[in-house]
Image: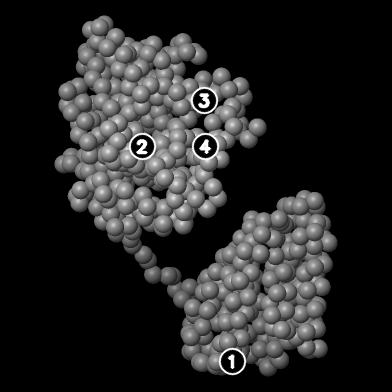
Amino acid sequence: MKQFINEKEDMVTEAIDGIIATSGGALTRLDGYPHIRVVVRSDWDKSKVALVSGGGSGHEPAHAGFVGAGMLTAAVCGDVFASPSVDAVLAGILAVTGPAGCLLIVKNYTGDRLNFGLAAERARAFGHKVSMVIVDDDVALPDLPQARGLAGTLFVHKIAGAMAENGADLEACAAAAKRVIKGSRSIGMSLDTCTVPGSPKENRIPHGMAELGLGIHGEAGVEQVISGGAKDAVAKVTEKLAAAIPDTPHVALVNNLGGASVLEMSILTHGFLASPIGDRIKMIVGPDAMMTALDMHGFSISVMELSPGDDELLAQPVTVPGWPGCKPMAALKTLPLPDGLSPVRAPASPHEPTKAFLTTCCQVLIESEADLNTLDAKSGDGDTGSTLATAARALIDAMDTLPLADHTQLYRAIGLELSQTMGGSSGVLLAIFFAAAGDASSSGMPMREALQIGLDRMRQIGGANPGDRTMVDALMPALDALDAGLSQAASAARTGADYTATLTTAKAGRATYINAEQLEGHTDPGAEAVARLFEHLAS
């Protein structure tokens, strides 16, 4: 089992009880488990218009996560991806509806429309004022007469919820909801399908492909497209949105479908705001997981045309855990680096042989990126190749600004460059290595001795010694053999690197946390990088 669940039939009730238990008393539920699962505001006194929404579970935090002052009054929860029953919806309506009436907010799926619709009719028969709106914001199939309801539903919750909280009557809340629906558009993209508890995973999206225009229940998208990274994904999504919205101010909602990382969502948001429709976005919600599809590795973007007063309603504070807030877009601001972080650099001095030498060394690291990442995944976090390649690319870009004709200053300049462009502990250690080598060279030491001084300083500060399964295992013997020639140095580096594959205990770096079985037979990626560099120089 690859999900933290107990019995399938208890999932929704246990999840609801978990939400209520952590609400600080803000939420409660109706009796009637397991058939009636309705989450309600604890402070509700029926003095204002009630907002009721819901649908299948699996979209958390929707819908229970939006119950609270300023948004929903109650959420009716069905089984995973299944509409709640008519009785459950009716129970929710009857529990929260007073003289001001009730607004039902329903996503455009057949089961939801039918069950919420029939419950509304029965509630009216009891004498209650009930209005219902249907959200159909999906633009994946623009000619489809029954577009699906997606994360644009949250705009309706927020605008109508703020109006109801401010005392607007049912007619005004319903009219605003319909206006918001008319002005909202959404589309999603995913790299993988979701995993429905108790069912086999449908692996219909091949590696290297993405699905565009898919729904929130794991249903197939409009088309499968080549996955070309975040910028390409945003371009494909915004192309669909641009064709469906006017050139007027909008609010955007960037939604995680459940399985994308926070890092990915921030990158996608950056790309979206830099897209051709980015200048239309005046307010933004997220990025955050708001209406998910279980663990789907994807995102959706919803936009809504702004009308006068919407900005205040969107920004009005709420007490619900699922709403991340709506913020106005602001120009990017930067502050200058503090004194001491803008180092004094030696003036650039050209020297073509040195430039060619450094460039080829950098290219070796860039070409080894994937191999070194694969090695690092066995004993670390899989990024050694990318860290070295990023530093190598930055060094190539900075080549014409370096003092190439003065090797003493060059060591120091390389150390400064690495300290600013190379992440992780490797960047710091190599910056120390080159800085110390530069200091030693300035006192008249030859190259090999200066580099050995750099290595000694790096070992002293970093704490790594031969046999600790680090780059030291390759670099130290290579420098010791350097006076005998590059071939001998390359051979020593390779022997040292290969030796790390026999070490089942690491005493420095992230590999210290890895067990012996995972380490045995895998060369340390830092040592492998050193060996490849010397082998290239020897060739």
Does 198 appear above or below 243? Answer: above
Q: Secondary structure at mark 4?
A: loop
Q: Residues within 10 Å of mark 3 (few under 14, many from 20)?
A: some
Residue 501 image offset from top left, x and y in percent: 80, 62
Q: In terms of image quadrants, where is residue 511?
A: bottom right
- The residue beneath circle 3 is 15
Q: Residue at x 61, y 60 (%)?
A: 383
Does 114 appear above or below 176? Answer: above
Q: As shown in the figure, which amino acid type bears the numbered disc 3?
A: Ala
- The residue beneath circle 4 is 194
Q: As shown in the figure, which amino acid type bears the numbered disc 2?
A: Ala
- The residue beneath circle 1 is 353
Assess whether mark 1 and mark 2 are in contact (beta carbons under 8 angstroms): no
Mark 2 or mark 1: which comes first in sequence? Answer: 2
Quadrant position of the N terminus in the picture: top right
**Separation of marks 4 and 3 at Cα, in angstroms:** 18 Å
Mark 4 or mark 2: which comes first in sequence? Answer: 2
Q: As shown in the figure, which amino acid type bears the numbered disc 4?
A: Cys
- The residue beneath circle 2 is 151
Q: Residue at x 33, y 51 (%)?
A: 238
Q: In terms of image quadrants, where is residue 466?
A: bottom right
Nearest the viewer among 102 and 369 is 369
Q: Residue at x 66, y 89 (%)?
A: 441
Q: Horizontal placement of 386 versus 20: left or right?
A: right
Q: Horizontal placement of 473 versus 368: left or right?
A: right
**Separation of marks 1 and 3 at Cα, in angstroms:** 66 Å
User: Is label 4 or label 1 in front?
Assistant: 4
Residue 176 image offset from top left, x and y in percent: 20, 31
Mark 4 or mark 3: which comes first in sequence? Answer: 3
